């Protein structure tokens, strides 16, 4: 029989394992943004699980399993994150390609180790694939300094309200492991991957046809600050302006001046009565410091912050903005809160730095000429009438950061970002279908859904806006400004209760790794380590 361990199912030759890994990676890549094909998650899981089931029995399957994992992990990363060289070009030049190879190679190595371990497990391989998948998604994001998370299926699942309802219960890692287990179980029961895939696709499609945005959970009302309006700043400059800090500073200050002196007519024409009193969120460090060579905060950024403080004092507008900050002599990527009559307060320092761009030194990070240093853990802060957890750009890829903020009382997630480097044309290499920026937005939407936490974003080089606690887009109430600097006004949605994922998310990866290690070490269980019976 076939069963969990493989049985009489014919084993795959090495070439078959490679083809299966490549096919599954391609299907997963087509299921994730920017492609509108999330249903391909189903055959992608089935193809990978079938390839694991059909690895040669015993120790002979370990090497093909490792090859399967290496090709699957590396090719998936290459296809989904193909935009990395273009995004890093303005910072690293041709070395951006080496940085991208490092990320793709990291995911290939993790895939090789994990699926090699699944093949070597002393329990049935399809059973070992369940914790193995969780480790595959979790491990790249916890590797110190160089870690970049592996884009998981949660980016596709947010398109399906009924399935996305599982995210607040199990977390993104847990839902991925559940899907891997479901694929393994269907193969055991159905014994024909193609037939099972067609049945599942049909049932899933019918289920989703009856779904809707209102089935993903319920929200509680009456939370403090819910229903208030905020203004999210959206900046859009050409790549040439973005690459020139002095020109960028001049254009931002000029746009601020224009809006300040022409705001009354503009706001009244847009129906903006009382807009001056709205809390504002400005993007991640819009103006680099003048002494960029040594990381210092010089006159250029001082002028930007002075202009914002003047805006706060003259219009009674509390705001938050990204800014370079210096603490204990080390330079960091931070967020400042500016209030009327108060000194600017650092409310967040970026903890997850982009390898090779922000984190450029292993030792002495943050000292002059040595990039930025990671920040410390900081709790949510008060803004827009409620408790806010803030992320800077790249940090949205790490679910454990959002889980911590949720547990510590955040009722609103705010992302300040600079997506200028993600846009097509930012570097000489091609970017398909605006993949970088669309994936970035999808990650924030997934975090909003996973932790039942409304999420807003203020951005340079992208779209400002947000999603409610069910992952539904928040409508714009109004937009005013010009093509280079605009304010997008939205109403803060209500927040639901803290979901189980806020507690399970930090545990899912370590628990899965422990289970996989046990699967490698438990003696005497019938599984992949034994040749199939010949009854």
Image (cartoon, rainbow, N blue to C red):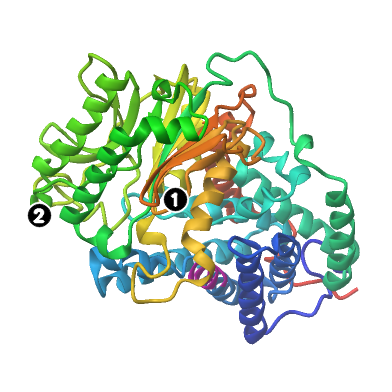
Image point 10% across, 35% down: which residue? 329
Residue 256 image position (x, y, % from top left): 28, 39
Image point 80% across, 42% down: which residue? 212
Judge whether 461 appears above or below 427 on screen: above
Q: From the image, tell me which residue sits under label 1.
A: 141
For the N terminus, the image quarter is bottom right
97 or 60: nearer the viewer: 97
534 or 343: nearer the viewer: 343
Q: Residues within 10 Å of mark 1 (few under 14, many from 20)?
A: some
Residues under numbered marks 2 and 1 in contact, where contact means CB atoms less than 8 Å apart: no
Left or right, residue 403 beside residue 416: right
Residue 485 image position (x, y, % from top left): 36, 46
435 or 254: nearer the viewer: 254
Q: Residues within 10 Å of mark 2 (few under 14, many from 20)?
A: few
Quadrant assignment, res 323: top left
Q: From the image, tell me which residue sits under label 2.
A: 293
Is residue 299 in sight in this rendering? Answer: yes
Quadrant assignment, res 105: bottom left
Would you say the magenta stretch is mainly helix, strand or loop?
helix
Circle 1 SS class: helix
Q: Earlier in the sequence, mark 2 or mark 1?
A: 1
The magenta span reads 72-79
Left or right, residue 499 beside residue 239: right
Image point 77% across, 59% down: which residue? 184
Image point 23% across, 13% down: which residue? 341
* Disc 2 from disc 1: Cα separation: 29 Å
Circle 2 SS class: helix
Judge whether 218 appears above or below 37 on screen: above
376 or 303: nearer the viewer: 303
Residue 475 image position (x, y, % from top left): 61, 38
């Amino acid at each position: 029989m076939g069963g969990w361990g493989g049985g009489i199912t014919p084993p795959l030759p090495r070439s078959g394992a490679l083809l299966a890994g490549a096919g599954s990676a391609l299907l997963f890549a087509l299921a994730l943004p920017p492609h509108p094909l999330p249903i391909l998650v189903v055959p992608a899981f089935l193809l990978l699980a079938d390839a694991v089931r059909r690895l040669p029995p015993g120790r002979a399957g370990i090497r093909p399993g490792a090859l399967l994992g290496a090709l699957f992990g590396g090719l998936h990363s290459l296809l989904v994150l193909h935009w990395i060289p273009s995004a890093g070009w303005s910072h690293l030049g041709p070395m951006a390609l080496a940085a991208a190879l490092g990320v793709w190679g990291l995911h290939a190595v993790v895939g090789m180790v994990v699926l090699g371990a699944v093949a070597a497990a002393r329990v049935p391989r399809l059973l070992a694939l369940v914790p193995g998948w969780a480790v595959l998604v979790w491990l790249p994001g916890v590797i110190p300094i160089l870690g970049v998370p592996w884009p998981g299926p949660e980016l596709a699942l947010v398109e399906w309200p009924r399935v996305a309802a599982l995210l607040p219960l199990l977390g993104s890692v847990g839902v991925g492991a559940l899907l891997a287990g479901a694929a393994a179980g269907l193969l055991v029961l159905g014994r024909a991957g193609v037939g099972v895939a067609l049945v599942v696709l049909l049932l899933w499609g019918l289920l989703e046809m009856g779904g809707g945005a209102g089935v993903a959970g319920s929200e509680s009302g009456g939370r403090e600050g819910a229903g208030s309006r905020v203004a999210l700043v959206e900046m859009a400059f050409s790549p040439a302006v973005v690459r020139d800090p002095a020109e960028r500073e001049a254009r931002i200050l000029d746009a601020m001046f224009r809006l300040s002196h022409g705001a009354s007519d503009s706001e009244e024409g847009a129906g903006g009565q009382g807009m001056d009193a709205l809390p504002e969120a400005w993007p991640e460090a819009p103006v680099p410091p003048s002494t960029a060579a040594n990381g210092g905060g010089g006159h250029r950024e001082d002028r930007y912050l002075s202009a914002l403080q003047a805006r706060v004092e003259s219009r009674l507008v509390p705001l938050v903005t990204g800014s370079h900050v210096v603490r204990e002599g080390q330079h960091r990527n931070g967020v400042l809160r500016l209030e009327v009559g108060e000194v600017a307060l650092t409310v967040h320092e970026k903890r997850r730095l982009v390898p090779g761009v922000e984190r450029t030194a292993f030792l002495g990070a943050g000292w002059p000429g040595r990039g930025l240093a990671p920040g410390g853990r900081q709790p949510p802060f008060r803004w827009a009438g409620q408790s806010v957890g803030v992320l800077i750009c790249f940090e949205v890829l790490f679910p454990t950061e959002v889980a911590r903020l949720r547990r510590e009382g955040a009722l609103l997630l705010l992302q300040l970002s600079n997506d200028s480097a993600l846009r097509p044309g930012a570097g000489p290499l091609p970017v398909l279908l605006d993949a970088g920026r669309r994936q970035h937005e999808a990650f924030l939407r997934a975090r909003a859904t996973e932790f039942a936490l409304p999420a807003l974003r203020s951005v340079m080089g992208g779209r400002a806006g947000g999603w409610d606690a069910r992952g539904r887009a928040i409508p714009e109430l109004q937009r005013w400004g010009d093509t280079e600097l605009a304010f997008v006004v939205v109403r803060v949605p209500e927040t639901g209760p803290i979901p189980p994922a806020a507690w399970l998310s930090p545990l899912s990866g370590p628990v899965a790794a422990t289970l996989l290690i046990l699967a490698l070490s438990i003696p005497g269980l019938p599984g992949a380590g034994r040749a199939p019976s010949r009854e």
